[in-house]
Image (cartoon, rainbow, N blue to C red):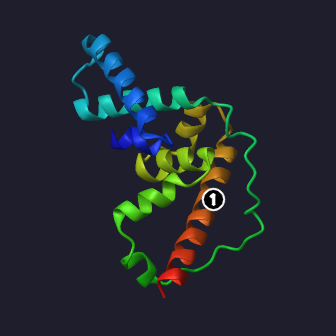
Amino acid sequence: MGVCLRYTRHEMEAEDILQDAFIKVFDHIDKFEFKGSFEGWIRRIVINTALKNYGKKSFRHEQIGLESQPELPLEPDIYAHLQEEELLRLIARLPDGYRIVFNLYAIEGYNHKEIAEMLGIQESTSRSQLVKARKMLQVMITDMQKIAV
């Protein structure tokens, strides 16, 4: 369910994706070849189901305008106070395209070539979306720190 929640904005949508993914798992369990981990195989099905649900064209034209903002160096103590739940909430606030590429790259461990193939985009688009996601997260984390002080 945690994987599904990272790719959606609403819990009900995540539940639908999880259900669809498990149906696919049960329909194709005979295709599991015991060459990798069963958990990894299921995770891949869940991610692919979430990506198909999202649709490939939605974020291609996303423009937030963060290109001109310099990356701000963050003090290490900002990260020390950031809890996992807080970070996941910040990631969930990212625009869809940024969030999906960030999740695939930073959390799931896919490279830009794999992400590009999965989403039907250029590798450069994947890189660009990741850079924009990181900048936006930096701004959000910095703003959180200002509020906390």
Q: Quadrant of the N terminus?
A: top left
Density class for disc 1 (Cα within 10 Å; few <14, some 14-19, many ≥20) is some
Relative to residue 79, is residue 145 drawn left or right? right
49 or 130, nearer to the observer: 49
Relative to residue 43, is residue 75 drawn left or right? right
The x and y percentages for residue 136 are 62, 63
Let me know if residue 113 appears in the view: yes
Classify residue 85 by image quadrant: bottom left
Q: What's the residue at 57%, 69% (across, down)? A: 140
The x and y percentages for residue 144 are 51, 75
Q: Which residue is mark 1?
A: 131
Let me know if residue 37 appears in the view: no
Placement of 58 over or under 89, stated as above or below: above
57 or 34, nearer to the observer: 57
In this rendering, the count of numbered labels is 1
Placement of 47 over or under 112, stated as above or below: above
Amino acid at pointer 1: Val
Relative to residue 101, is residue 80 drawn left or right? left
The x and y percentages for residue 17 are 42, 28
Classify residue 40 by image quadrant: top left
The x and y percentages for residue 18 are 36, 29
Q: What's the residue at 73%, 71% (across, down)? A: 69
22 or 12, nearer to the observer: 12
Q: What's the residue at 41%, 84% (across, down)? A: 77
Classify residue 93 by image quadrant: bottom right
Residue lying farthest bottom?
Answer: 149
Q: State the SS at label 1.
A: helix
Q: What's the residue at 50%, 56% (across, down)? A: 91
Relative to residue 34, is residue 31 drawn left or right? right
